[in-house]
Amino acid sequence: MATPDAWLIHFFQRHTEDDLNRAVPAIEFLDGVPVKVRAEMQAVLEAVAAAPPPAFSGGGKWEAMHDDMAGFYEVRVRGADRRNHRLFCILERDAKDLGGSSVVVIDGLSKPVRQAADPRDYRRALAYRTEFTARRTVLA
């Protein structure tokens, strides 16, 4: 059971003015990864939210990002498919419009082990974060 200090988990949903289908990029990403990877990512998100995030020790599964991706945190899972899977999240402390402090899951990517991610994946996540910041829409 969650402690009173636990954070909420929300998934960013695109606004109709940006996407008529109101896509949820992180859910679409998770639907495309192996079931075991999806389950592990969900478990990490739940552990982070329960800790809550400022107190969570990532153990390599939850890491702050740097440089252009500063402000993001990533859930990091290596799959049996020999690919690294990443889920990009932002933290919203005391977000009244979200019901309280929240981990907002923005997007994800998969890449071969020991290869750099495609810069387009990072640009897409940054654009989605900008959309979220402007519109504050999450999956209901």
Image: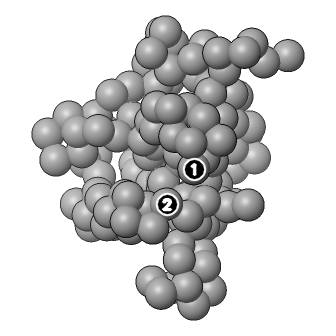
The numbered disc on residue 137 is none
What x and y, as percent, mark residue 76? 48, 33
Of badges 2 and 1, the one in the foreground is: 1
Q: How is the image coloured?
A: one colour
Lateral position of residue 27 relative to residue 113, left or right: right
The numbered disc on residue 97 is 1
* Quarter-of-image position of residue 69: top left
> How many numbered badges does the structure rendering display?
2
* Quarter-of-image position of residue 130: bottom left
Q: Is residue 81 above or below residue 44?
A: below
Q: Residue at x 53, y 72 (%)?
A: 14
What x and y, as percent, mark residue 1? 85, 16
Q: Is residue 102 above or below residue 46?
A: below
Q: What amino acid type is highlighted by mark number 2?
A: Arg
Count neighbours of disc 2 (C-alpha within 10 A) and say few if under 14, some if 14 to 19, many if 20 or more: some
Disc 2 is placed on an element classified as loop
Lateral position of residue 28 relative to residue 122, left or right: right
Mark 2–mark 1 distance (CA, rounded to whole Å): 8 Å
* Quarter-of-image position of residue 9: top right
Q: Is residue 98 above or below residue 91?
A: below
Residue at image mark 2: 136
What x and y, as percent, mark residue 41? 63, 36
